[in-house]
Image (spheres, rainbow, N blue to C red):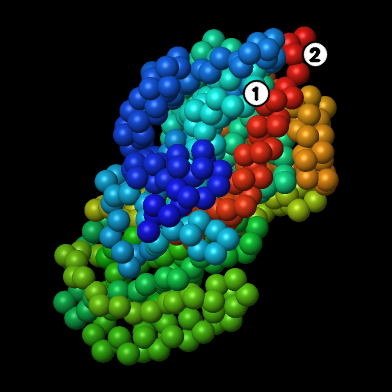
Amino acid sequence: MSEEIRKLKPVEVWENFYQLTQIPRPSKKEEKIIKYMKKFGEDLGLETIVDKVGNVIIRKPATPGMENRKGVILQSHLDMVPQANSNIKHDFAKDPIDAYIDGEWVTARDTTLGADNGIGVAVTMGILQTKNIQHGPIEALFTIDEETGMTGAFGLKPGMLKGDILINLDSEDEGELYVGCAGGEDANVVFKVKLEAVPSDYEAIALEVKGLKGGHSGMDIVLGRGNANKLLFRILRQLADNHSIRIANINSGSLRNAIPREGFVTFYAPKGTKDAISKEVKEYEKIVKSELSGTEPDLSISIAKAQKFDSVIDKKSQNRIINAVLACPNGVLRMSDSMPGLVETSINLAIVKSDKDKVHVQSLMRSSVDSARQALAMKVKAVFDLAGAKTKFEGGYPGWKPNMNSPILKLMQGTYKKMYDKTPEIKAIHAGLECGLLGGVYPNWDMISCGPTIRFPHSPDEKVKIDTVQMFWDFLLETLKNVPAKGN
């Protein structure tokens, strides 16, 4: 079915996007796509470089008469978020994405599509290939590992690129130009626990939270969607109080930058209490579905067939973990004072997983105000310090401060108005674009971010609106045609 997308327009983009769906490229496992992009550039006869961390840089000379224009860097990231529904088996390191056309959209069957940021990559590839367009000097910068640590952006060295303007192609709303983004930081928590033998008069019970929408932990955090970790541990607190359950295994959430859609726990309860527990879970499901009726129509909280384990977490540690997860901040904490509708500070309680004698908790904090992010980190650490866990903060990256006097912003505003007879919206984004890091390495760059319309990235509901890809392609080509000469 996925080959049908190759017939969409602009063909220069969709053919390349199809090829990307056939190349496994989850974060941290980009070897195949790096090799593919290197060959792609070399086959075009263009200067192609792979730097020490794996970023791919391809240079295309200016078309005749455009040699004196400012150099433009087209930037996108090669990796994609590997999320799949639990009803299928999909190996993102080996299996292609099954993309298909669904009305006005392109989406994928039960997995993330990889339009984030595959469409940006495909657009850049089309520009590198196409000969009948006008542009000044172009450098294509394809970074790695944007989704799990921005390793490529962190590893980019000064002097590698020569251009003056950076156009990041990783935004997700056609008709909007982004001039700022949030910074972020991971909170990694470890509980050390004691393992005890399963009580002889206890039986195994599995509890599942499923059917949540999930989504991008920055873009979608404002939508008020359910968090599987919060929902799971809320009922665990109740069951621990009412039935003295003992937790054996926790596997809830999967990616730091995705709102957790599913959570699974196996616990042991006194024999003869399963019916009462099942009744409580059903009542709890009704309560939560009522609370989230406008956002989570497919939410399911249920008892399932349980796998048996040899041990359970000691009761003291169990109580500390449950209480800490319940107390940990989650969701939108503050909206921006200066830009209506923009989230300033948020946190996604992303993962809770047990591993032998340890339980790991991971959250991703975001804020466009660095001091607010630091204050949030103090709060998170305070919660887990009180619970006796160790907290480590990693992968911090700065936000990107808006420059409303940006020359590329003024050019693209005018170009869009002329083409579509409407003024594009100027926005900042509550997500971690690489512009903040890249601008720290190349402070001379004039930066902007844009893209076609993508919905529900980082979830199996991810989709890209077909007609906006054509609009974005046309807009970008017209922008490149009108980039000013150096010195202007």
Q: In which quarter of the image is the N terminus?
A: bottom left
Q: State whether residue 234 is above or below residue 410.
A: below
Q: State whether residue 42 is above or below residue 421.
A: above
- Can see residue 400? no
Q: Position of residue 374 (x, y in %)?
A: 62, 38
| Picture residue at 56% right of the left edge, 14% below the top | 61
Q: Name the residue under label 2.
A: 488
Instruction: Mark 2 and mark 1 in contact? Answer it, CB < 8 Å.
Output: no
| Picture residue at 82% right of the left edge, 38% below the top | 418
In the displayed orientation, state which residue is furthest to the front: 132
Q: Which is in the foreground here, disc 2 or disc 1?
A: 1
Q: State whether residue 134 is above or below residue 266.
A: above
Question: Which residue is at the front of the view, 69 or 262?
Answer: 69
Q: SS for tag 2?
A: loop
Instruction: Say whether residue 370 is left or right of residue 309.
Output: right
Q: Residue 134 carries which label?
A: 1
Residue type marked 2: Asn
Q: Distance between the residues labelled 2 and 1?
A: 19 Å
Instruction: Say whether residue 173 is left or right of residue 278.
Output: right
Report how many numbered discs are placed on residues in the image: 2
Q: Where is residue 122 in the image (x, y as percent from the top left)?
A: 50, 38
Question: Which residue is at the front of the view, 271 or 71?
Answer: 71
Question: Which residue is at the front of the view, 44 or 344?
Answer: 44
